[in-house]
Image (cartoon, rainbow, N blue to C red):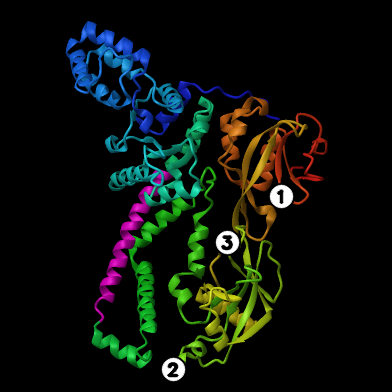
Amino acid sequence: MNTAAPVPVSGSVLGALFASNKVTSVVLIDDNAARVIRHEIWIVLRQILEDSDSQTATAVANLLESNGLDYTDELPPADFHQAILDLLQSACEAARTLVENARFGEGELDRLYEYLGHSGIPVTPYSSPETAPYDAQLYFVDYNIGETPGTEGKRAESFLIKLMESHRPHRTCPAVILMSRQEPGPRQWGMIANNAHVVRFCFRYRDKQELVESEQHLAFHLMELFDTFPLAQQYVGHVETLRLSLASAAQAVANDLLRLTPADFCAFASTRMGGDALSSARHVRFLFSALLEQALCGDTDVAKSLTAFVSSLSSKSAVVNSDGVSLHDLQGRILYDRTPTTIAAPLGFGDILVDNLDSPNRFFLVVTPECDLEVRAGGNAKAESVLMIEGAFVTVRAFGESLEHTALMNGASGEAGWIEWNLKKLCSLEYKVLRDLLPNTTANKRKWGSLRFQFAERLQNHLATDLLEVGTEEFMEGYSEASVAVFLSQDATEHCGMISLCHMRAQKEEKKSELALGEDVGPLLTHMADFGMTVEEILALRRLSPRGEFITKLKQFKLFLFSNVNGTAMALVRLKSGDVNTWIKPGDWGNANPITK
């Protein structure tokens, strides 16, 4: 058992953290970062100016008088705060010091500025992103910088775009924390990060109140951010090299493709494709993708940059990100074509239909050969009926000679899983019926997309014969997060908040899966002393580790995982005494199953 007391956070911790990551300046961008001239400051400020700086005192008096105001008013209107602050830039040192030490217009910003000030690193606040510099190493940027409803995040996004562009030529990236008191949700801030091409390793979104709840909270989030920062710097350099080499290879292929002449291509299209514009366009796309593949394989610059890029991808990220794994999305776009062009195209081999009315998780794969489905005069195809394999969305894969699986990533309810194609479940419909059925969005079947040709061909071959095996790429099995209630003892009433548990599903074997705590570890940080944990130890639980190792780490702090009998709720319980059978479960749990043994 680990009985070490939590390490208190001090200026030396933040200072050492910044020094080790070569952070020499910090920038705060928030519309509340303008100093506020409160009543008590205004009274003292007037006296200082009258005693020591008559020139500035006169300038301030003239400003107010010209607008029908009295210099001796208890407090100038908010409209004139910034104008007076501008006049004070050249005022006497005592007046400037008074204003510089004044609080901001927001308590959370005051605390953030105070905590960062303990590090000894210069911290500069800006109330507008348009005046902020691009050469700092750490930025705290407010999500909503004085915008009107519906435009939130736009100024922050614009600043981040310019910030990343300024660093791109140097192949570096700053660390950025986007913060807000009203959480916009992962989709909104995720769009900002994507549009600004921010590297996730050096970017976080944080609730402002949670960020500054204590200096320990701030230290934890900064330690987590900088834990991946060296990898981010390496990654950015590799990405820039890869981007330039890929652009060069793609441009060379485009130049070759543009050498096609109408006379040459028209003869080919009329002979081989009957002059059909859709088939000709598809052939040009095939030419480009095939030539690009050849160029990528033969270009030494691309090969070197890809190798370097993969080396950074192979470096396991120190912490898990709550937005999941983008590789799922990229692979899904390759595995399934769900573009509007494909959805609107005539029925073809590899198309996937979905049961539109009865079950959104019931699929049908068209395996009739491509040539038999080619549209001919009159809008019909050679095939009178269309053969389809039936599939269903599953979250647990079964194994059998008649089953094939392709990764769906997310079902109709958002859970990760597969399409399980059952080769013993075949059906067919008349071509004419399907042709008239698919454009109707309220019909019992609609086109969902198209399966990548190699995978559709594999299923077709498997259906026809077991003698032919076609190799295919491996796809990641799944990523999910579960909400977990945190309890301090056996008594289920001592509930101290919710955290999340990240689960990376491994290939085929559940016991080889990996676990980590999610980003919302606030309850653990708040009750660190009760759990006997340090910031570093909580951060260690944020790193993906094999299921057994993760559970062993929990047991070091007498922490045990439970799930209810239906598997719909989970709890992390601190058992100071007794065993897993002594926990008093919440009333609506019934019998709970201990996961940690």
Q: Indicate left or right for 207 with 174 as reference.
A: right
Q: Image quarter for residue 398?
A: bottom right
**Secondary structure under the numbered disc 2 in the rendered image:** helix
Q: Nearer the viewer, mark 3 or mark 2?
A: 2
Lower sequence index among marks 2 and 1: 2
Q: Mark 2 and 1 residues: CB-CB less than 8 Å, in contact?
A: no
Q: Is residue 243 inside the magenta stretch?
A: yes
Q: Indicate left or right for 173 with 569 as reference.
A: left
Q: Is residue 557 inside the magenta stretch?
A: no
* The C terminus, quarter of image: top right
Q: Extreme top residue here?
A: 51
Residue range highlighted in magenta: 231-260
Q: Which residue corresponds to the image point at 59% horizontal and 34% vertical from the top-left?
A: 538
Overall secondary structure of the magenta section: helix
**Secondary structure under the numbered disc 1 in the rendered image:** loop
Distance from the alpha carbon under mark 2 to that under mark 1: 55 Å
For residue 568, the mark is 1
